[in-house]
């Protein structure tokens, strides 16, 4: 809430929506009365997102993200929860609605040592003219919020308002994640 200022009826797009953070954001936005668009890469993850209440799932491996957003959301998206960076960031920024908010919480496209350059001409001018907000959010820089929000998180889990999904690798070709050797596989999955 502190980063995105989500309001009822906002259109909220979540990248990596079937990931740990993404699933929480999807459910949180639905609880706030938002229309949620979730990006994912597999039919299995798409099914999970539908179960969590995602209104529109976009499989970016089989659908063209830019075309989907242009056709289905011509007025833009109010809130974008962005974790990928690079070209995905550029595409999403081009679909940020006037007065829209984009929260950057990661850049997985750069995690393998590849620097990602963003090429958005007149970025600052576009932000100003669109009255848009672009902000970074790093959880450890917000530790003072833990005492306030952690009890709410636990309460939502206990009261079945927030579903936590654990993937232990049972459905992967290499089997369950066991031991330190499985850490990389677990993160990549």
Image (cartoon, rainbow, N blue to C red):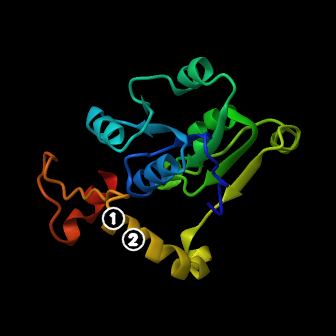
Residue 53 locus on image (x, y percent): 39, 41
The N terminus, quarter of image: bottom right
Residue linked to disc 1: 159
- Secondary structure state at the residue bearing disc 1: loop
Closer to the camera in the image, 109 or 12:
12
- Please give left or right for residue 76 compared with residue 163 in the image: right
Q: Quadrant of residue 129?
A: top right
Residue linked to disc 2: 155
Residue drawn at 82 percent across, 43 percent down: 127
Label 1 environment density (alpha carbons within 10 Å; few <14, some 14–19, many ≥20): few
- Please give left or right for residue 138 compared with residue 25 in the image: right
Closer to the camera in the image, 176 or 113:
176
Residue drawn at 61 percent across, 45 percent down: 8
> With respect to residue 54, does 179 lie above or below?
below
Residue 56 bears which disc, if any?
none
Task: Say whether marks 2 and 1 touch (CB < 8 Å).
Answer: yes
Residue 44 locus on image (x, y percent): 26, 37
Q: Quadrant of residue 42?
A: top left
Q: In 3D space, how far apart are the residues under numbered discs 2 and 1 (Cα atoms)?
A: 6 Å
Residue drawn at 52 percent across, 47 percent down: 84
> With respect to residue 17, does 42 lie above or below?
above
- Secondary structure state at the residue bearing disc 2: helix
């Amino acid at each position: 809430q502190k980063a995105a200022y989500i309001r009822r009826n906002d259109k909220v797009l979540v990248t990596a929506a079937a990931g740990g953070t993404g699933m929480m954001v999807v459910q949180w936005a639905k609880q706030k009365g938002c229309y949620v668009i979730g990006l994912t890469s597999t039919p299995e993850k798409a099914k999970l997102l539908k179960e969590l209440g995602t209104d529109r799932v976009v499989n970016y491996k089989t659908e063209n993200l830019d075309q989907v957003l242009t056709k289905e959301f011509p007025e833009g998206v109010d809130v974008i929860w962005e974790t990928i960076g690079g070209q995905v960031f550029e595409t999403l920024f081009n679909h940020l609605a006037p007065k829209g908010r984009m929260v950057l919480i990661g850049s997985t496209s750069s995690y393998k040592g590849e620097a990602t350059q963003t090429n958005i001409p007149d970025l600052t001018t576009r932000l100003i003219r669109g009255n848009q907000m672009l902000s970074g959010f790093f959880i450890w820089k917000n530790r003072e919020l833990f005492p306030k929000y952690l009890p709410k998180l636990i309460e939502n889990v206990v009261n079945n308002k927030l579903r936590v999904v654990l993937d232990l690798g049972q459905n992967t070709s290499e089997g369950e994640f066991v031991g330190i050797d499985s850490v990389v596989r677990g993160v990549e999955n």
